[in-house]
């Protein structure tokens, strides 16, 4: 079933000729290539509008009878989850909790119009929040807003000024990351997420969850550790937290333990009785009970339990981001854009496959980018889909993004009327909500035994990503993880598996003879295969492997075999006793004791001058493997043109019959079914193979060539 080229006499076809034919047959003209893109018609215009605004494709056909009740219940449930998660994840982003509510409102409405997934819930997410928090804390540390009190000389922190600047940083980073996503989506760059493999994403989110836990320990224990940045910062923070443990606020610790117990118990009950409960118990409403207990128990004033503080009523007016910060946060913004999109598209495609609809990766990139861009103007921070909220939205009957609109209404009512009531909510309760919602991410540690059994390379990527994310922080960790993941791909192409194929008797299967004992070689035919495509980085390795595979086969049969063409009149052979050089005048036998000349009349030991002539003739032509073995031959880089004449003068003639085949092999088939493309180095290498083997009357065939490999 593959294409073959026979370079033998009378039927030779040059690769360049095949190249010209392929280009002529398959390459369209510039006019033909551009004509479909610039042609305009009503059906094409309609498809463009519907693909840009997906809401127009499903909203006119929306059935209130079939979907209304499910979307309403789902929207209310998700909206209730938005309230505590929005405020809790705002702490991760190091901004006031009310901005987490804003983030749960504006971007959700934008995605409902532009998104193609029907089930994911856009909003705050722990990993993205901690990435934004690392930027805000780095550019606006507490030390920049601390001043000495002139009265008693104590240090005072200007919280209002610090929070205002951090919000500005978060909004600017969000707008820039959104613009990155929009631009990538417009140039159809949605495939970029394919470079983030699933082990990499899961290892990265697990490492980010570790960052989240460490960042929330100060709220759980009610302590004030120092802030560190840069590589190994999480290690230093953890050490400093342990140093401050004797200063733990007992009231805060008790609140944290009680909230953790209640949250874990109710979450487990929801999991155990998932099929029996019509709706999951909305345990996130614990914030209401915690607020009431804190208010009537005076936890803040009597026990110094940190609370959320004043939450302003109403929405913020839009404002322009501070573009002067973009040069400082450009790397962080790009990392946020890529990670947020990777999480969003993976979750969206999961639900799309489950429910039988298509999720457009490029449109998702644009939708998420515009959600972040528009949200940034309203002082929101970056968003992506949340697995916990998306599962609730699906399990409670949500079928369209109308559920997202309903959840936004719940958040809007809270911001306009109920937000001020949560001023006495302990921050420790919000941290506990974050902890419990990280359960799914920490369950990803179970990937380790699964990957150990299935794929050790993926396991290595997972572990390296986890370690880099924890030790190098989120930005450098992501870059190092992607680099390592790409290196594994390069190493796999650099170290492919080369094999000789044999036919399984009675079938048309051709398998590796070293792996499958049933596979037997066809007499006189050698089929050589590489497990990966051949290109400039491994073309020489391919040639070496071809030589070694064929050489090893013939040595095991005690037969000499042609290795590499030294010139039009000189070849060298390998046997178990040494290397033989074949010329028109005889066979030169090379050992460590010298060079012997074999003719029909006997073996003659060559003089030093004769040996020098042979060495000069062999320069730059000896195979690399033998160059390593016979290091004492002083091989150079040029080939003498007089070697044959010199040898002929000192020896008798054997005849042309000596240049016959060196083994029973008369055909070599190169299986290129794994090659998706070829470059000029590969073409030159194949040309050399054709030329060299033609000189000893061995036919070379190419099998399994793709169409792209012929151009």
Image: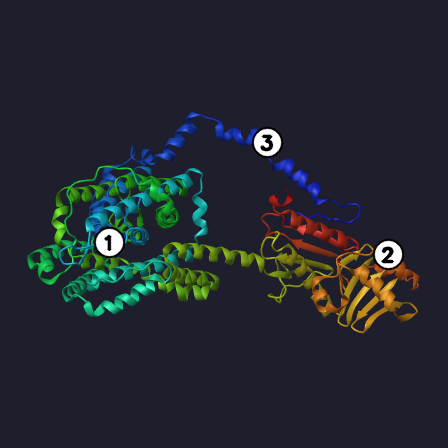
Image location (x, y in percent) of residue 63? 26, 37
Q: Is residue 647 visible?
A: yes
The quarter of the image holding the C terminus is top right
Front residue (pair 39, 208)? 208
Res. 468 image quadrant: bottom left
Residue at figure coordinates x 43%, y 29% from the top left = 44
Q: Secondary structure at mark 3?
A: loop
Q: Nearer the viewer, mark 1 or mark 3?
A: 1
Q: Which numbered marker is on residue 642?
A: 2
Q: Secondary structure at mark 2?
A: loop
- Near mark 3 (Cα within 10 A), the count class, few <14, some 14-19 or many ≥20, is few
Q: Which residue is mark 3?
A: 29
Q: Nearer the viewer, mark 2 or mark 3?
A: 2
Front residue (pair 74, 362)? 362
Calculate the distance from the C-alpha at mark 1 to the C-alpha at mark 3.
57 Å
Return the disc, 2 or 3, that comes first in the chain's sequence. Answer: 3
Image location (x, y in percent) of residue 384? 32, 47
Instruction: Answer left or right for 248 relative to 231.
Output: left
Image location (x, y in percent) of residue 697? 79, 55
Return the disc, 1 or 3, that comes first in the chain's sequence. Answer: 3
Q: Which numbered marker is on residue 581?
A: none
Q: Secondary structure at mark 1?
A: helix
Residue at figure coordinates x 40%, y 67% from the top left = 449
Instruction: Answer left or right for 28 relative to 405.
Output: right
Return the disc, 2 or 1, that comes first in the chain's sequence. Answer: 1
Q: Is residue 368 visible?
A: no
As drawn, 110 above or below 37: below
Res. 92 image quadrant: bottom left
Q: Which residue is mark 1?
A: 91
Instruction: Answer left or right for 669 relative to 169.
Output: right
């Amino acid at each position: 079933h593959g294409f073959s080229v026979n370079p033998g006499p009378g039927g030779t076809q040059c690769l360049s000729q095949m190249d010209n034919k392929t280009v002529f047959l398959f390459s369209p003209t510039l006019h033909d290539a551009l004509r479909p893109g610039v042609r305009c018609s009503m059906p094409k215009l309609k498809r463009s509008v519907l693909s840009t605004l997906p809401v127009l494709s499903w909203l006119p056909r929306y059935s209130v009878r079939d979907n209304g009740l499910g979307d309403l219940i789902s929207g209310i449930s998700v909206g209730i989850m938005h309230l505590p998660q929005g405020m809790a994840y705002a702490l991760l982003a190091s901004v006031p909790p009310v901005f987490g509510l804003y983030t749960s409102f504006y971007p959700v409405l934008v995605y409902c119009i532009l998104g193609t997934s029907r089930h994911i819930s856009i909003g705050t997410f722990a990993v993205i929040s901690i990435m934004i928090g690392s930027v805000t804390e780095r550019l606006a540390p507490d030390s920049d807003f601390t001043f000495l009190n002139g009265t008693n000389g104590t240090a005072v922190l200007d919280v209002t000024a610090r929070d205002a600047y951090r919000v500005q940083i978060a909004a600017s980073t969000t707008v820039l990351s959104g613009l990155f996503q929009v631009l990538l989506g417009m140039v159809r760059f949605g495939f970029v997420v394919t470079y983030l493999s699933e082990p990499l994403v899961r290892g990265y989110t697990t490492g980010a969850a570790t960052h989240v836990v460490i960042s929330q320990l100060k709220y759980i224990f009610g302590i004030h550790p120092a802030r560190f940045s840069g590589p190994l910062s999480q290690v230093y923070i953890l050490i400093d937290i342990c140093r401050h443990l004797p200063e733990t606020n007992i009231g805060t610790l008790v609140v944290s333990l009680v909230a953790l117990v209640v949250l874990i118990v109710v979450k487990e009950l929801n999991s155990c009785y998932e099929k029996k409960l019509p709706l999951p118990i909305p345990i996130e409403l614990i914030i209401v009970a915690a607020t009431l207990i804190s208010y009537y128990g005076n936890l803040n004033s009597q026990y110094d339990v940190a609370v959320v503080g004043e939450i302003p009523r109403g929405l913020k007016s839009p404002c322009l981001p501070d573009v002067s910060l973009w040069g400082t946060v450009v790397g962080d913004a790009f990392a946020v854009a890529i990670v947020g999109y990777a999480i969003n598209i993976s979750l969206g495609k999961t639900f799309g496959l489950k429910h039988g609809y298509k999720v457009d990766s490029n449109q998702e990139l644009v939708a998420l980018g515009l959600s972040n861009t528009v949200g940034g103007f309203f002082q929101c921070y970056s968003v992506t889909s949340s697995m916990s909220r998306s599962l609730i939205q699906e399990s409670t009957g949500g079928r369209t993004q109308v559920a997202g609109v309903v959840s936004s209404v719940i958040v809007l009512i809270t911001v306009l009327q109920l937000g001020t009531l949560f001023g006495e909510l302990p921050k420790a309760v919000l941290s506990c909500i974050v902890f419990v919602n990280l359960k799914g991410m920490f369950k990803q540690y179970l990937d380790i035994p699964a990957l150990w059994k299935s794929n050790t390379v993926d396991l290595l990527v997972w572990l390296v990503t986890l370690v880099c994310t924890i030790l190098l922080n989120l930005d450098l960790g992501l870059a190092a993880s992607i680099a390592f993941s790409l290196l594994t791909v390069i190493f796999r192409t650099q170290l492919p598996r080369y094999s000789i194929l044999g036919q399984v008797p009675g079938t048309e299967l051709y398998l590796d003879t070293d792996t499958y004992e049933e596979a037997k070689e066809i007499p006189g035919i050698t089929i050589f295969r590489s497990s990966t495509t051949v290109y400039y980085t491994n073309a020489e390795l391919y040639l070496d492997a071809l030589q070694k595979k064929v050489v090893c086969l013939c040595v095991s049969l005690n037969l000499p075999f042609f290795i590499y063409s030294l010139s039009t009149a000189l070849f060298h052979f390998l046997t178990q006793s040494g290397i033989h050089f074949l010329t028109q005048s005889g066979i030169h036998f090379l050992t460590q004791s010298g060079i012997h000349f074999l003719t029909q009349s006997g073996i003659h030991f060559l003089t030093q001058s004769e040996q020098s002539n042979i060495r000069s003739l062999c320069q730059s032509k000896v195979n690399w493997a033998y160059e390593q073995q016979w290091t004492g031959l002083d091989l150079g880089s040029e080939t003498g043109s007089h070697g044959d004449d010199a040898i002929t003068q000192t020896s008798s003639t054997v005849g042309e019959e000596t240049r016959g085949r060196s083994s029973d092999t008369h055909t070599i088939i190169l299986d290129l079914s794994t090659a998706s493309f070829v470059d000029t180095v590969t073409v030159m290498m194949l040309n050399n193979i054709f030329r060299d083997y033609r000189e000893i009357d061995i036919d070379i065939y190419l099998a399994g060539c793709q169409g792209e490999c012929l151009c």
